Image (tube, rainbow, N blue to C red):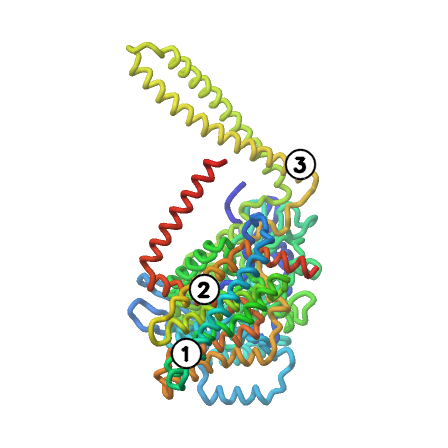
Amino acid sequence: MSQDVQVRVPIPEAPVVRRPIRHWAVPVVGVLLLVQTAVLLAIGVYNLWEVGAAPTVEAFLRRLNDFLGAILALLAPLTLIAAIACLTARRSAWSLAILTQGLGLLAGLILYMREGPPPLYVYGVMIYHIGLVLYLNSWDVQASFRARTARVNE
Amino acid sequence: MSKTIRDGRDTGDGDTPTQQAESPAQENQALLRRFEPTIRYTRGEQFYPMAIEPYVRESSLWVRRPDEDPHRVIPERALTEENLAEPREDPFGTVYFLRFIEPLQIASLAAYSLKSSRRKREAIDIFRAGRGRLARVGYASRLVDALFSVTLLARGRVPGATAAAAAIAYRRIMAEQEGEPQQCYYGRVARQDGWIALQYWFFYPFNNWRSGFFGVNDHEADWELVCIYLSESGVEERGPEWVAYSSHEFTGDDLRRRWDDPEVEKLGEHPVIYAGAGSHASYFSRGEYLTEVPLPFLAPISRIADLLIHLWFGLLGRAPRQRGAQDEGAPLSIFRIPFVDYARGDGVSIGPGGNRAWDEPRLLDPVPGWVSGYRGLWGLYARDVIAGEDAPAGPMYNRDGSVRRAWRDPLGWAGLDKVPPPAEALFRVQTRADEVQAQCATLAATLDEKSREVTGLGVQVAAMRGRPHLGKLHETYRNQIVACSAEIDRLRATLTSQQAELEALELYEQRLRAGVPDPARGHIRRAFHPASDAELRLSRVAEIWAAISVGLMLLSFVAVAIFARQYLILSLAALISLLVFVEAGFRQRLTQVVNSVTVGLSIVCTLIILFEFFWEAIILAVLVAAVYMMWDNLRELWR
């Protein structure tokens, strides 16, 4: 053996800094997701209403962009499930929460890239989701999710 | 204590000339024999330790001078240990090397392959990789691996059929030996600072890690070292104290284990070593070791990636996952190529308790000419700059002709130079404690003197107050007080630290007197760890997926480029996403992947928002900062 290879080995762990776990973070995420559900539902319904108000097929096609906006409403049930999972401290709560944020951001990007200027609510949706992604990834929230789900599972 | 290394053993004055010539050698041989290791190989291993004579006889000596093509100096069959060691004068940059084998002719190789396939292979000859290395790592690593494989075509390497030819030559050499084929090692007994280092050097004619076991490299010749350390004054009572095996890039403390460490497997007084298949690297435990080869040209990208990861985790207040951590979820570095070193120990076993025995050890005391006189490579010089396809030099030298640390400093090589032999430990601790105590006394005396000085200056300054004609002197004394106080502070800090050191030494002395040993693994910073059972569990479907996924992605890319070029970027993104999610599903890491993708999307969205609302974002940030400052200041007022 005479080459420069490296065996993967554990490196001693960095000293653990004990920080207080904020147990209220999980219900807060649940509430934020409930708010998100309501907003998405409202945007979706508003867009569907706009589409539904089109009297002819031509008008419907012209308003296809509004129909695209309705996809946000499709995310509302999933977000609601994630919110309930958070409030009842299910093990899958964090995964569901981050999945809904990913899908929401994807929907936001699709709405942004469609023809014509995007409606303002798209940016609002994006900002809200970005904030939640950061919050869900913060140490405090992750620690409280772990602690809470462990406590419930016990 | 002398720092010199003594090979062999000093003889007493009363010995007869015959005894002087024989006794130390016999004693060394007996020591080597007594603790010789047992090496367990992996099924399918083709090369075992052998004597160098037949190898040298089969090899030719070549030289490559700067700006010249290599040319043969001594042909096969004419090369001996004696003419190999002859001194030669050459310009700087000249490389001497042996060539054990020429690649087989196509016909010969075909005949060999046919013969091999007809021969009923014993179970001990058959190697099965099990879970493939690519199934253990992610896409990026697989792509980098593909790149690495392509570079093999361009860079210097051992030619393709050489391993097969070497196997034939090795079998022939073994068959020519009288009776049973004998495996042997070269032994050296070095005495240094109260320690006896038993060095076992193993010579293999070929390293077929790449061609035989999907590893990093092939090269002709391979020298491996196992070292056992005994206390000079306690060989009989205590036996070995430490063992160290050469293994990949490990150096110093990480190489050695204490004899009573549970990781050191033993058969009586013989340590058991698990040799990597083809690589012959030595391991303490059986298993499969995931190794990584860094690619030098990717180092800058790797550094940038590390920086970004640290920034991201810093933003979230989370500690980044340490590179190299071997827990199940830890990502491999995507800028290193993964390989597996199989040290399963399910094949041939050589040594005490094994199915083959060691031949009489060949002593390297006194140092033979072929060890000290030949500084060249022991096999083909492939001029490979990446993965070590060049053969190594002999036991005494590095490839550049400098003396190996393992040879010139057997203790320092395993980080044992700072460890006293057990019999001397107490004495060393007491000596050190005396030294520190003396330093403390000197410091205390200096401090007394300085304290008197600063007090005197203080009194002087106080006396001068209100005397305008002494203004300049007053200023000078004040400056002297500042300097003196700083000096006193420094001295007190040193004294405090030395007192703590002394206290630690005294406690350590008490522990030694009570016979409490140091922790067996306290010196290890990075340890070998074979892959766990959980890491080795992966379904066959996932294995097949790992093998074909990158190729599948490239084929799909070509199809999109031909039939739907207008949607190239979109299709590519969808394709990669699909593959990544399928892969993540196999590895039960879907949540991590979803999170990574979401984080990526949020970065894109942030950039869009900044692009669309740059000035609004600036104004908002300033507003938030202003409100926060006001709130913070008001909160302070209300408290």
| Residue type, numbered disc 2 | Ala
Q: Residue at x 53, y 47 (%)?
A: B417
In the picture, measured across the screen, residue B377 lies left or right of residue B429, that is left
In the picture, measured across the screen, residue B241 lies left or right of residue B68, that is right
Q: Position of residue B304 (x, y in %)?
A: 39, 60
Q: Position of residue A15 (x, y in %)?
A: 56, 49
Q: Which mark is residue B372?
A: none
Does mark 1 fall on the same chain as mark 2?
yes
Q: Which mark is residue B393?
A: 2
Q: Which mark is residue B510?
A: 3
Res A90 visible: yes
Q: Position of residue B603 (x, y in %)?
A: 41, 64
Q: Position of residue B124 (x, y in %)?
A: 64, 78
Q: Chain of mark 1?
A: B
- The N terminus of chain B sits in image quarter: top right
Residue B567, relative to residue B91: is it above or below? below
Who comes first in sequence, dot 1 or dot 3?
3
Res B82 visible: no
Does mark 2 fall on the same chain as mark 3?
yes
| Residue type, numbered disc 3 | Gln
Between B266 and A142, the one lying in front of the other is A142
In the picture, measured across the screen, residue B479 lies left or right of residue B13, that is left
- Badge 1, how many Cα within 10 Å: few under 14, some, many 20+? some
Q: Residue at x 67, y 59 (%)?
A: A152
Secondary structure under tag 1 reads helix
Q: Residue at x 43, y 79 (%)?
A: A53
Q: Nearer the viewer, mark 1 or mark 3?
A: 1
Question: Disc 1 marks which residue?
Answer: B572
